[in-house]
Image (tube, helix red, strand yellow):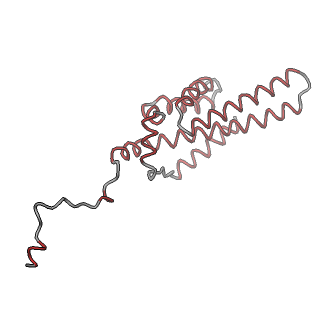
Amino acid sequence: NMSNANAANPYAAPTARVEDVPANAEAEAIRKAHISTEASIKAVGLLYYLGTIGLGIAAIGSLIGARDGVSLGIGVGMLAIGALFGFVGYGIRGLKNWARITGIVLAALGLLNFPVGTLINAYILYLFLSKKGRMVFSPEYQDIIAATPEVKYRTSILVWIFLGLLVLLFAAA
């Protein structure tokens, strides 16, 4: 009988379209709640890269024009600090907790660069010390990133404008 074939079988396994349900809905929800902070922290890593480039150029200029031991020492010091910034920027971009701690120390020192450095470093401290910032640098969040590669941050035009102005201010400082 054809009508019996179309009737629901109470003993059949339930059917659902699996592709409609994310593999790990909780991890995806956590990632989406933190993706903006994650993107902002990675942008800080880019600022450290810019600092590396700026200090590298200044160090080379200082070393080329060195006339005495003091200017030679300044050039070597700038080169060392630039290398540190590059190393920390790499760690921040990789969301490594050691880079968060080092970044907190560098940002606290950067507060002394009044007025632009104070503003930028206060924001960096906020990012690194906030609840979401601590989560983004945690090992648990690394697992969430690995489980949710499809979750991407979409940058709005206002953020690009703000970042452009921030880079200009940083370059001017």
**Count of marks overlaid on the render:** 0
Quadrant (top left/top right/bottom left/bottom right) for the N terminus: bottom left
Taking depth in this image into account, of 151 and 119 the one nearest to the observer is 151
Residue at the location (10% across, 70% down)?
7
Taking depth in this image into account, of 154 and 87 the one nearest to the observer is 87
Q: x and y percent of residue 2 in the render? A: 10, 79
Q: x and y percent of residue 120 in the render? A: 59, 33
- In this rendering, the answer to whether 92 lies above or below 13 is above
Taking depth in this image into account, of 53 and 126 the one nearest to the observer is 53
| Residue 3 shown left or right of residue 91 in the figure | left
Taking depth in this image into account, of 97 and 62 the one nearest to the observer is 97
| Residue 151 shown left or right of residue 111 in the figure | left
- In this rendering, the answer to whether 12 lies above or below 58 is below
Quadrant (top left/top right/bottom left/bottom right) for the C terminus: top right
Residue at the location (12% across, 67% down)?
8
Residue farthest along the right direction in this orientation: 67
Residue at the location (33% across, 44% down)?
26
Q: x and y percent of residue 45 in the render? A: 60, 38
Residue farthest along the top direction in this orientation: 70
Residue at the location (62% across, 32% down)?
88
Residue farthest along the bottom direction in this orientation: 2
- In this rendering, the answer to whether 113 lies above or below 167 is above
| Residue 136 shown left or right of residue 51 in the figure | left
